[in-house]
Image (tube, rainbow, N blue to C red):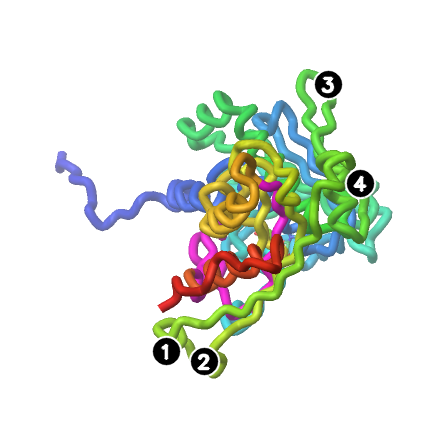
Amino acid sequence: PSRRLPDPQTAIDRTSVHRLTSGQVVVDLQTAVKELVENALDAGATSVDITFRDSGVEAIEVKDNGKGIDEGDWEGIALKHHTSKLASFADLAAVQTLGFRGEALSSLCGVATLSMVTSTAATAPKGTTLSFTSAGACVPQKKVARERGTTVKVERLFEHLPVRRKELVKNAQRELGKALALLQAYALVNTGVRFEARNVTKGKTLVQLKTTASTSLRTAFSYIFSPKDLPSLLDLDLTIEVPTEKSVMKRLEDAADESTVIHVKGLISKPSTGHGRTAGNRQFFFINGRPFQPAKARRLRVAKAVNEVYKSFNANQFPCVVADFQLAPDAYDVNVSPDKRTIFLHSEGNLLAALKQELSRFFDPQQARFEMKEIG
Ligand code: ADP
Ligand code: MG
């Protein structure tokens, strides 16, 4: 009998590859929830309900009242790189939706068990349950009663990645906390959307977050935190002009502008009444409504810049901050990593220097302590 040597040409099987790459998109409970909530928002939902079962260890369900999924799209939605949001590579520069890579559902199939119920304006009040294989193939099941919208259910996250599964189970409360912090961020910035998140453990339901659709950030803030904090907050509204770095400009086509204007909108503690002695506590940063990962807020360079300025007015506390940086789509790039956590900002150094100057002027117009000498 001939001895069979392993064939060096043989790549690992497709299922394993899918599981491995999926684990890079969906890295933890927070990213799983983030992808589902972003899809709900991209579908135009004005109401999003998130249910964690056993802190998310058993299942996560996200129910929305968005536009639903047309029957013709069922087959493709959970296949890799299938997206309804980008038609060509050129569209990427101007992408307005939160998702665009067409990888989330495909990856969730790879690392968990995915199923959904969906209904469109044309089919409501009837919908269809869909289940998916680990490769993302869709198996339509039965007709059910369902108003327009979609409910996506992710069961047993990381069931095929034992080390991650163990970590998730062991740190369930911390992981749930990270996911809830991200939901707070989405609920703050999407004021027109009603959010409710609950955790169902051993038959007991605990509501963790609840907002109503409103038009103001202050209202959203008071639902998520407490109305009694509102008087200590100032409405943040800065216009900053950021000189663009020449080195960056040279590499960009159509680089005619020598500066970009950025608006920073949100809320910040008055210098007299900060929010505690810990950085990152109640600090939320966004770019055009896209949240930076809140669990890492205190390590962000923009957070450091804001805290540094605030410190010169209040040496003992850190501020509560909600800050949305509104800038032109070509001034940043979210397509740096599969989980879209890294956002590449052009001329970041100049932006931070200009931000510091404007913020100190905001707190005390008499003395802009931070001059723009850092640029050069
Ligand atoms: P992406 O969001 O990058 O397009 P996803 O894998 O997250 O990729 O989703 C694939 C497609 O599935 C989306 O482009 C969208 O058409 C559809 N989809 C997913 N979730 C929803 C939802 N909650 N409501 C409507 N359509 C959805
Ligand atoms: Mg998506």
Left or right: 38 with respect to 129? left
Residue 218 location, x and y as percent? 75, 46
Separation (CA) of disc 2 from disc 1:
7 Å
Look at 53% across and 42% down and name the residue there.
Answer: 31
**Residue 153 falls in image quadrant:** top right
Q: Is residue 284 above or below residue 317?
A: below
- Judging by the rendered image, the residue that carries numbered circle 3 is 204
Nearer the N terminus, badge 1 or badge 4?
4
Number of on-image labels: 4
- Judging by the rendered image, the residue that carries numbered circle 4 is 144
Look at 55% across and 58% down and name the residue there.
Answer: 367
Residue 285 location, x and y as percent? 57, 49
- Judging by the rendered image, the residue that carries numbered circle 1 is 250
Query: What secondary structure is found at the residue carrying circle 3?
Result: strand
Cβ atoms at labels 1 and 3 below 8 Å apart: no
- Closer mark to the observer between disc 1 and disc 4: 1
Nearer the N terminus, badge 2 or badge 1?
1
Q: Amino acid at mark 1?
A: Lys
Q: Is residue 237 above or below residue 282?
A: below
Cβ atoms at labels 2 and 1 below 8 Å apart: yes
- Judging by the rendered image, the residue that carries numbered circle 2 is 255
Query: What secondary structure is found at the residue carrying circle 4?
Result: strand
